[in-house]
Image (cartoon, rainbow, N blue to C red):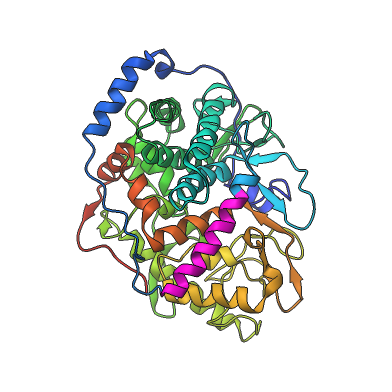
Amino acid sequence: MLKNGKEHLAASWLSRRDLLRHAGGLGLWSLVDPSKLLSLVATAQDKQPEPSPSATAPVSPSLSPEDDQFLEELERLNFQFFWEQGSPQTGLVKDRCNVQTNNNSNVGSIAATGFGLTALCIGEKRGFIPLNDTRDRVLATLRFLWKKMPTHRGFFYHFADVNTGERVWDSEVSSVDTAILLCGILTCRQHFEEHSEISLLAYQIFNRVDWSWLSEDTSLLPHGWTPELGFLPYRWDYYSEMMMIYLLGLGSLPHPLPVQAWNAWKRTKFEFDGFRYIGSFAPLFIHQYSQAWFDFRGKRDAFADYFENSTLATDAHRRFCVELGKQFPDYSDDLWGITASDSQNGYVIWGGPPLMGPVDGTVVPSASAGSLPFLPKAVMRVLRNIKDHYGRAWCRYGFVNAFNPLKNWYDTDVVGIDVGITMLMAENVRTGFVWNTFMKNLEAKRGMDRAGFKKYGPPAGGS
């Protein structure tokens, strides 16, 4: 899931984001009688466990009423991005948007669309948009994804024209971006569970994905495939945002991943300032994306409690930025957060610890915002500081993608997936809504069960 469209598959990140092409064929599930499938859907829903109540008070006691009001405003602006930059006809969401000029780009991102589908559920729940309008947009999106959007073995191209769905930039069919899209689809299925067509389309789209093809000759899943090159050589072999790929594949009934796939990738330990956690030489977002939907609180597999792991990684990152304040005096407890983002010199993959990329004092609001459930107090301190003291970093859709106070540079763009992780994590820290809704899906529960997750204590919470 390349976090950029502006630079067209930045060379330094292209090696991690592979390519695919539409090959036709809907597979076994296209042959199922829809009326029978609807009956199966209803039966499966009847067997689902009762969801945890979606509280109206913040999940974390660390949020004050003023914090909650701030996040309400932020989510409302985030929602407007997905509503205005999503096509009413196809539902595809633009990869990014320039907030200072007319945005004429037609480049959509399936990952941004996955975040956007989840944003529609949040927006309807919070009264940002009427129920009928929300359902119409969800239906338009799912119909297009099922009937018209090019796929290969059920996987989608990373970047596509928002009006036609056709592949752009020779982009890859992406395993992780497809996973993000599926998470959004499954969230819609549960939020609109009484709408039979939404349920049917969600089941069809999810079950069309051939995870067994992705793992034909390896337990380490490839990043993608292209019609020109076939499978790219890069594998999801280290801890990262890829956990959602493996868990969704493990949760599939028609094309499941083998259980050993979950145990195949490496869980390398990092240490900084006394914090020891599983990580990778990668930006902070790798600790956030899977956890926007999958609820790891109070659970662990044979290796780790990944919620607590992300909390430790976020706190290590905060301390890393504060330490960098000796070199870049804008970084402090009030202003920290570096992850893959725009910069004055283009799109950059940077972060730490350890230091990676040409860090220059740039601040990325979504880096801290995406960790809201892990460190609520520390993150709120940053977000409120940015809005109160860096006015040019605040725009019609919330925060701009990045800014550098030392150079007086402020981005003109917002990026869909960064707006998305901000909105979803804001809602999760407030009510747990996305977690509670998504985890009602049997595919999600089955995936975590097959991966060996067990409850071992009360749900964790940040500080």
Q: Between residue 187 and residue 340, name the one nearer to us.
A: 187
Q: In the image, is 421 to the left or to the right of 276?
A: right
**Camera-side residue of 455 and 399:** 399
Q: Position of residue 290 (x, y in %)?
A: 43, 51
Q: At 65% across and 85% down in the image, what residue appears? A: 329
The secondary structure that dominates the magenta segment is helix
Identity of the residue drawn at 51% across and 31% down = 139
332 shown above or below 301: below
Give the residues drawn in magenta, as a range: 64-81
Q: Position of residue 12 (x, y in %)?
A: 67, 53
Residue 74 forms part of the magenta stretch? yes
Camera-side residue: 343 or 81? 81
Where 158 sits versus 400, above or below? above
Q: Is residue 235 among the parts visible in the rendering?
A: no
Identify the image quadrant of residue 167. Answer: top right
Residue visible at 42% across and 36% down in the picture = 218
Instruction: Note whether residue 121 is visible.
Output: yes
**In the image, residue 200 above or below residue 403:** above
> Horizontal and vertical percent for residue 129?
52, 46
Q: Position of residue 36 (x, y in %)?
A: 31, 16
